[in-house]
Image (tube, rainbow, N blue to C red):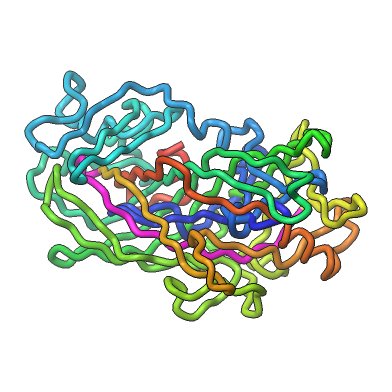
Amino acid sequence: MRPTHWTFLIVWGGTSAIATASACGLDATGLRATEAGAPFGSAGDETGDGSAPLNASDGSPGRDALAKDTGSDIAVTSDATAPPDAGAKPDAAADAIASDTASMDVATGDSPSDAAFDASPSDVGVDSVDSTGGGTDDSQSDAANCDFSGTWATRLVIDVSWVPQGIMGVILAPGSGQIKQWLLSTRTVSGSMTTDSAAVCGIALPDFMGTQIAGGEKYGIEFPDAMFDSGNLPTFTLSGALAGSGPGGTFTTSSTAVLLGLTLSNPTTAPWPATITTEVDSDQDGKPGVTAYASQDAGYSNIQVDPFGNRGDRVYLAIRQVTSVTGNVLDCDSMAGTVNIPQIADSSGAPKYAIDSHVIGCRLVGDAGDCSAGQTTFVDTTQPVFSPSGATTFASVRVGDGATCATARQRLP
């Protein structure tokens, strides 16, 4: 997380869910995550070198592939008779979802059915089913009426910008980038209403750069895959509605809050507290909140935890993200659309996007123990604040009932 509002952006939406509350952890090629505008996920920015906030992109697969669109442009229409990937095969509407190396852009016009889906077929092939449950079931791909119940993987991509706070105005440079989030959910359908039990499966945050005064250091924050894969993180419920039962239909959800590292009454509307008094050890590692790591890759610096140059390599975060979504049914096994992040008044009454986080603790480098209360406050109050600044999109695909968080990250890289 970054030393200031490292906001953790977790969004759940779409008939599949938008990266919000599932758990999937960190490894050598694990996902990077910064807290921009909140804890490290989105609101916080943990500096790796102690002089600037942390961020999450280090060139590893989970982060630097954020915005590379190497796929072909495929116009997806709401007309069920015109599959989006003409010339591919009958299931092209589903197969055109994404490429393992391609990013996806979804832009909506006057109506959800006008969405343009920009991706390449190799990303999410709905025709691939494997015996482990990690593939998709395309038995419904050409059906006029779809049964959307089952297990879904979702990827959320959010364009954000950030500005430093306090002393970080000297240390951390303003910037922009993308946040990626992954989610796995189990959906039940009753008539036109849907209910998803979802969990966050991964978070990747952009890198943060220091000013020239601070030596131009680079900072990154990582949420380990192991944290999400452990199954310890809380699940959340998403309520949605379908208009139409096949390709060309739309999917919308009510506002949903994802909480990590704390409890909060009325989480979809409550002001973000100035200090956290209801922290919870969500990842069950013996530390409050959820733990994110300063990138130790070459070229990255540890987080500055005070004005005297001391550094930290871990941050403990509390995160709240509120979102709703509107999506298009591409076929019975895939959806894509846009995400809305509302503004909610903070404790001072000023409106802010509901990408909220607090640094509620940190660890000093060299395993020198946890930060003091003053050092924790320094990191929390100097983190950058994230704001949505462009496309905010999601893509969802049906996966086998035995799918895991690792499946979600692999299917929608």
Q: Is residue 411 above or below residue 242?
A: above
Near-viewer residue (208 or 235): 208
Q: Which stretch appears magenta?
A: 314-333
Query: Horizontally, is 293 left or right of 387 in the view?
Result: right
Task: Identify the residue at horizontal 64%, vertical 75% (top origin).
Answer: 279
Question: Camera-side residue: 318 or 4?
Answer: 4
Q: Is residue 155 left or right of residue 151?
A: right
Closer-to-camera residue (230/265):
265
Q: Residue at x 21, y 61 (%)?
A: 241
| Residue 174 visible to the viewer | yes
Q: Position of residue 287 (x, y in %)?
A: 72, 68
> How many numbered discs, if any?
0
The image shows residue 205, relative to residue 401, as above or below, that is above
Give the residue displayed 24% in from the left and 38% down from the top: 115
Magenta highlight: main SS: strand
Judge whether 399 appears above or below 374 on screen: above
Asked whether residue 41 is in view, the answer is: no
> x, y percentage for residue 290?
64, 63
Please tell me which residue is depicted at 17% across the width and 18% down the height of the picture: 87
Where, by quadrant of the figure, is residue 361 drawn?
A: bottom right
Image location of residue 159, percent across then percent down? 48, 41
Q: Nearer the viewer, residue 270 or 351?
A: 351
Asked if residue 278 lies in the magenta stretch, the reply is: no
